[in-house]
Amino acid sequence: MTSKKTELMVGIFVALAIAAILLLALQVANQGMSGNGESYNVSAKFDNIGGLKARSSVKVGGVIIGRVSRIYLDDRELIPVVEMEISSNYIKTFPETSSVSILTAGLLGEQYIGLTPGFVFPGEDPIYIGDQEGETKYIVDTKSALVLEDLIGQFLFGKDSG
Amino acid sequence: MSDILVDINKMHFQRGGRVIYDSISLQVKKGGITAVMGPSGIGKTTLLKVIGGQLYPDSGEVLFQGENIHQMSRKRLYDVRRKMSMLFQSGALFTNISVFDNVAFPLREHTKLAETVIETIVLLKLEAVGLRGAAHLMPNELSGGMARRAALARAIALDPDMIMYDEPFAGQDPISMGVLVKLIKELNSALGLTSIVVTHDVKEVLTIADYAYIMADKRIIGAGTPEEIRNSSSELVQQFLQGNADGPVPFHFPAQSMQETFMGTKS
Amino acid sequence: MNWLISLGASTLSRLSAIGNASLMLWGALFAVPRLKNISLIIQQVYVVGVQSLLIIIVSGLFIGMVIALQGYTILVNYGAEGSLGPMVALSLLRELGPVVTALLFAGRAGSALTAEIGLMKATEQLSSLEMMAVDPLRRIIAPRFWAGVISMPLLALIFSAIGILGGHLVGVDWLGVDSGSYWSIMQSTVEWDKDVINGVIKSIVFALVVVWIALYKGYDAIPTSEGISKATTETVVFSSLAILGIDFVLTALMFGIN
């Protein structure tokens, strides 16, 4: 009893819905980037992470290379540890001397991790982040988030906290 | 098996605290036309719905071919319902599909016949009620009488054992009334059906009925062949047959006395 | 004493209505797996889904455009008009898409379902189905139920997608926000599972509730013209209240607790 016209219209309806899903997936949520492919883990210890959250992005010069997967407190040193997932496209890319800092996108934007690639001593076998085992897998060179109150404090009370 | 198709035994039914049937009993003979007559608003339609298993009585039993309708499993009830069919007062045609599809509906639901076979059956059934030419029309294009005949074609589509007619003559002009009377009579003998006709059109139904019951005041007040009914000595039956305005069935709906209503006095 | 009795009576009648509605839902839910029903469902998807498409597309477009316009005038004060993309996308995906679609659906398709079922009851079509040994729950209620549950999430997705395009139209093409930043900041902010999927879950829940209310109100309507008009009104009112109430609960569960 279902006529051809009905079936055609329902077909168009479903096709429209699929087009909407594709638009949302590719153009809006950028599903292609985040869920895609393998990644490796890197951790870093900060004194203060400010407003950083899980799923904040990790960027090198503005290019997203990964996301923050987990934030927790180191139970011995009582300082925050940020665990990051870096896309495997960038494995063996950044030397262990690279530094990470917590930056803010614009004045009101959200916070992200900026990674500055380190240098490699010529003639030495480079060690990359993600290669190290155990304790040393932390990125050593970190710079904490800027906290506005601290900045104001420094400004008001001179250079006593240097 | 006995020749009683439907056997209602001391059935008691009430709805919303109002008693509709007070312990009534009636039998429907196989192969005959049984008429149930009575004034409007007495719940004659309800009786058909009880027989069809849509409503449940408070006590008493309703047997169809010796089986209690209201104690069947749901599956068995649906099997039994294929043997009965019902012509509703409004016709109850599905308004979104054509007359042809309406008649084909029970066939498509319950059989796996090929579409060509269904077409043949449907046209035969429509021919039987004289509406073969109207097969392509939509239900809203039919007159009341034609809609009822189309519904009748749908009711006989699956060749049931029994048809229940709910007020088949109500609101019909004399010609379509005559057509329906002829159809009920002919279908009954030609298809070997059993018919129950619920109506208040006394004259018409008494010409075709084999046996008749008259209901009033929650009870059955008269029963017998048409001849016996016509010669009944009961005042109630005679009032109903002759259509007198006042009598044992009062003209006034029960109310306070006039004096109380208008003068505000309380007795 | 009297008010206690009336409280008890009204509680009992509410409970029995909920019980009846649940029985109906139960009947409809378990009437799925028959091949014959597929074509009935497709037909109903046409009625409740395809015929709601126009109103959904037009509303989606305009709501997207309005958010962009309003958002721009506020964000531009902070020099943050680049965040217009995520603002439009998030408000559509998380809230407006599912909620407005459900409200429109209740008004457009829900009321029609109630009126249709109520009229079928009033004209004895449901009764006559039953007498033809065809279960009305299976033949009439179930296909409409599933068609509604299938159609609504699709409509909500279309609504959101069209709205985001409408926001682009106003924000980028008229007000001059940079197209690149409209899309890229949206992409870095919107998350597939958290925002898109949660929106879809919301609209599935709304669909269940709206279709359930609409079908039950029709099935339970007093079969007179007055009864049907009352049932239709109640469908729209109850569905809308239910949508907004459930939306708050779902939002609290999905986005409120971190």
Image (tube, rainbow, N blue to C red):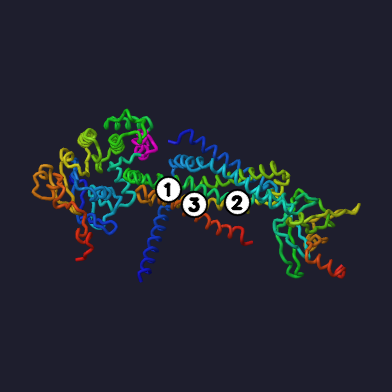
| Magenta span of residues | B94-113
Name the foreground residue: B49 vs C38: B49
Closer to the camera, C66 or B157? Answer: C66
> For the residue marked with disc 3, what is the amino acid?
Leu
| Residue C211 locus on image (x, y percent) | 47, 50
Numbered mark located on residue C114 in the image: 1
Helix, strand or loop at disc 2?
A: helix
At label 2, the amino acid type is Ile
Q: Is the residue at mark 3 from the same chain as the one at mark 2?
A: yes
Q: Return the chain for callout 3.
A: C
Q: Residue C197 bears which disc, if any?
A: 2
Mark 3 to mark 2 CA distance (whole Å)? 17 Å
By secondary structure, the bulk of the magenta-drawn segment is best described as helix
Neighbour tally class for label 3: few under 14, some 14-19, many 20 plus, Cα within 10 Å: some
Q: CA distance from mark 2 to mark 1?
A: 30 Å
Please tell me the numbered disc located at residue C208: 3
Percent position of residue B120, x then y: 33, 29
Circles 1, 3 touching at the beta carbon (< 8 Å): no
Q: Helix, strand, or loop for circle 3?
A: helix
Do labels 2 and 1 touch, CB within 8 Å?
A: no
- The reply, left or right, for residue A10 in relation to residue A93 is left
Q: Nearer the viewer, residue B134 or B115?
A: B134
Q: Secondary structure at mark 1?
A: helix
Residues at marks 1 and 3, common chain?
yes
The residue furthest front is B263
Sequence-earlier tag: 1 or 3: 1
Crowding near the residue tagged with mark 2, few <14, some 14–19, many ≥20 C-alpha atoms within 10 Å: some
Residue under mark 1: which chain is it in?
A: C
Q: Splitting the image into 4 quarters, where does residue B111 fall?
A: top left
Subunit of mark 2? C
